[in-house]
Image: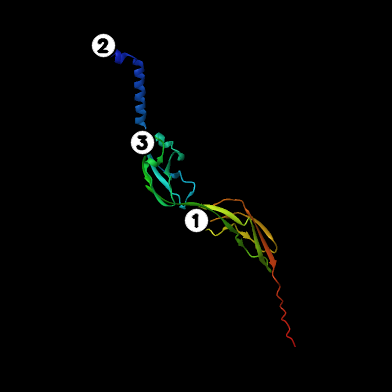
Amino acid sequence: MRDFFQRHVVHNFGLKLISLGLAVGLWLAVARDPVAEVGVEVPIEFDNIPQNMEISSENIPRAQIRLRGPERIVRRLQPPDVYAGIDLHNLHPGERTFDLTPQQIHHPVDLEVVQVVPSQVHMAFDERFVRQVPIQPRVIGTVGAGYSISGIVVDPSTIVISGPKKHVQAVDAATTDPVDVSGAVGPLAFSRHPYISDPLIQVADSNSVKITIMTQKLPTVSNVAPQKPE
């Protein structure tokens, strides 16, 4: 019995006492750390989207995540620490519904996902399409009295756009910021940016275009009535 006590209790007694103290201290630290819960709104990240595909839904949803864990971890939580991920490999054009589960939420390891809202995400996808469209400047105002607009020159006259195929095909032309010709009696030159109102379409070249407005004088009308032949 004495040998057992010497071998298993007294041997390295100091190290065993230190280990016991550390274990008790760690247990007390964990036991005193209250559990907290927090709700965060996070973006949904789409991974592995094919290069020839585009998201054609105008509104990209976000997810409401409720997390639970030690209060000290919850208090240190930063927005980049939590996000939802959806894998889009083998994606084809059309509408798709994806489940959002706790397993798809990236978060600190010490926290637990309690709830995910919404539990599903419905999105539309289409092929990426590129085409060239004309630029039609938006002209406002009225030229000077006795004059009219004789021509409008846009340089360059076209622009390249890209985006979901159906959206791009629906565009007839790009427009520009307003060009005010009020009171003009001679050639005017403007620099304006072209744009497409559809938010899902990208303009390849964001440089401004040169718009030249040309005017001409209207022919004068005589108020003297022609004489009748005798």
Going by the numbered disc 1, the residue's amino acid type is His
Which color scheme is applied? rainbow
Label 2 to label 3, Cα distance in Å? Answer: 46 Å
The label shown at residue 2 is 2
Label 2 to label 1, Cα distance in Å? Answer: 88 Å
Q: Is residue 165 left or right of residue 215?
A: left
User: Which quarter of the picture shows residue 81?
Assistant: top left
Q: Which residue is mark 1?
A: 167
Residue contact at pointers 2 and 1, CB within 8 angstroms: no
User: Which quarter of the picture shows residue 177?
Assistant: bottom right
Residue at (41% x, 35% y) in the render? 73
* Viewer-nearest residue: 218 or 36: 218
Residue 170, horizontal then vertical, whole percent: 51, 58
User: Which quarter of the picture shows residue 88?
Assistant: top left
Q: Quadrant of the C terminus?
A: bottom right
Residue at (27% x, 11% y) in the render? 3
Going by the numbered disc 3, the residue's amino acid type is Val
Label 1 to label 3, Cα distance in Å? Answer: 49 Å
Q: Identify whether 146 is placed above or below 130.
A: below
Q: Identify whether 20 is placed above or below 181.
A: above
Residue at (35% x, 24% y) in the render? 23
Decide: few, some or many residues near mark 3? Use Cα within 10 Å; few <14, some 14-19, many ≥20.
some
Going by the numbered disc 2, the residue's amino acid type is Arg
Residue 149, horizontal then vertical, whole percent: 66, 65
Q: Which residue is mark 3?
A: 35
Residue 108, horizontal then vertical, whole percent: 41, 36
Residue at (36% x, 25% y) in the render? 25
